[in-house]
Image: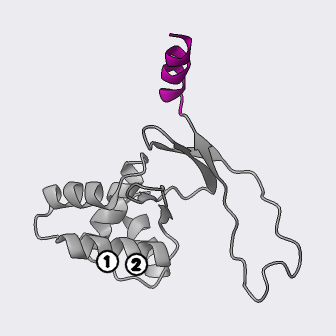
Amino acid sequence: MDADEIKQSLACSGLRCTPQRYAVMAFLLEHNRHPTAAEIFKAVNRVDPRSSRATTYKNLRDLVQAGLVREVAVEGRAARFDATGMRHHHFICDRCGKVEDVEWCDVLRPASGSLGKRILREAELIFRGLCVKCAPRRAARSVS
């Protein structure tokens, strides 16, 4: 996504294109490794020291609410953020906490009425286990 597309996506979502918000969105689009809010703040602040931690966190919240960014909750660790436009699921490593994208597959919707009066927007899968780097270490440890 180039600069004009970022500005247009912000405008279409009802968000003003402030320099700080633009910087957060641009960073997330350039870095698909699912950074934490603290990592995003450090990176954005290196480029524009006027950007405060509070502004960065508020911009992340606004981008999530606008649907431009997804927040991936990682149990016992800082949430991670993802601006990848294509729908996908996530795999979270139990050992190192790495978050990886997993190709999208449709998820069955709950049976009619099972959610009560709740309105389902989307269903997403989060797979948990050991990533490619951590799995061999566990296998090697159990052999020893």
Element under label 1? Answer: helix
Circle number at residue 110: none
From the viewer's side, name the closer residue of 33 and 115: 115
What main secondary structure does the magenta stretch of the protein show?
helix
Element under label 2? Answer: helix
132 lies above or below 123:
above
Q: Residue at x 17, y 70 (%)?
A: 51
Q: Magenta part of the protein: which range?
A: 131-144
Q: Residue at x 48, y 26 (%)?
A: 133
Q: Residue furthest bottom?
A: 117
The residue to which callout 2 is attached is: 62
- Find residue 127 and report its horizontal and vertical position in percent: 63, 47
Q: Residue at x 43, y 80 (%)?
A: 11
Question: On the rendered structure, is 117 left or right of 93?
Answer: right
The residue to which callout 1 is attached is: 58
- Find residue 56 and report its horizontal and vertical position in percent: 27, 70
